[in-house]
Amino acid sequence: MSPRGVTMPDVRERLFAAAERVLAREGPGALTSRAITGEAGCAKGMLHAHFAGLDEFVADLCLDRFARTARQAEELPGRAGENTVAENLGGIALALLDSAGPTIAGLAMTRPAASLRVRQAMEAGAPGFSAVQEAIAQYLAAEQRLGRLSGGTDTGAVALAVAGTVHHLLMASWSGAPDPRQQVERLVAMLTGRVGAASGDVPDRE
């Protein structure tokens, strides 16, 4: 427990990480301000000192994790020519699932005020699925220029398929539903198997 008057570094991230642990261990019903601060090992009022309430906290957690994945996606075009197309696409798709997992996204959807805040932030330009989709499209275009992807591939459509599917899985996953990671892996394998390499090259396979 932090002493009174002592400032903790990176308190937002400490609270976000604590909330993720509570969600993973006990589910959305257990997520309260007291549970979060107790898990973080800080004063009970710390969350309300940094957020207007639990709805704002949940929305900012969701937005923070989306932004983190968008930053990861921005690095994807620079990896063109490395590993395989399937590995690179699958890696960013699974990173999105991991950093903005179904539990977090689903939690935001069950709290109307948090959902509204997320939507308004996205409309105002906060990084999210659109940024990830654009980064994937840029990456696929780079692979086309290297000849590792067919020149006739609609890179925008493939990017939309990956980002859109992950978005759907985040919003629609629930206890007992099929493992979203396995579904993403099958989608990526199907897409990369179809678009393949340029004429004369061996299609990219895992």
Image (cartoon, rainbow, N blue to C red):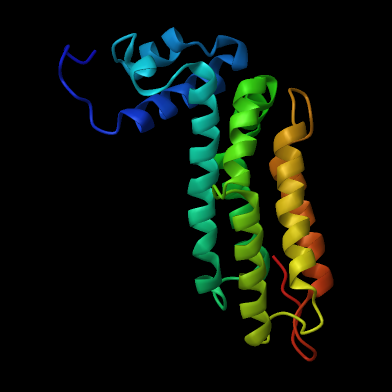
- Across the whole image, how many numbered discs are drawn on residues? 0
**Residue drawn where x is 39% and y is 24% of the image:** 15
Q: Quadrant of residue 167?
A: top right
Task: Identify which residue is drawn at 51% across, 47% down.
Answer: 67
| Image: 61 above or below 73 | above
Can residue 115 be spotted in the picture?
yes
The answer to whether residue 103 of the structure is visible from this angle is no
* Pick the front one: 86 or 80: 80
- Residue 16 relative to residue 190: left or right: left
For this orientation, the residue located farthest to the bottom is: 200
| Placement of the N terminus among the 4 image quadrants | top left
Question: Relative to residue 5, is residue 15 depicted above or below?
Answer: below
Residue 47 % position (x, y): 38, 17
Where residue 52 sits, quadrant-wise, is top left
Which residue is painted at 60% across and 16% down in the image? 27
Q: Is residue 15 above or below residue 44?
A: below
Residue 175 point in image, percent of width and height? 74, 22
Residue 122 image position (x, y, % from top left)? 61, 44
For the C terminus, the quadrant is bottom right
Q: At 64% across and 63% down in the image, what residue appears?
A: 134
Task: Residue 159: give x, y in percent of width and height.
Answer: 72, 62
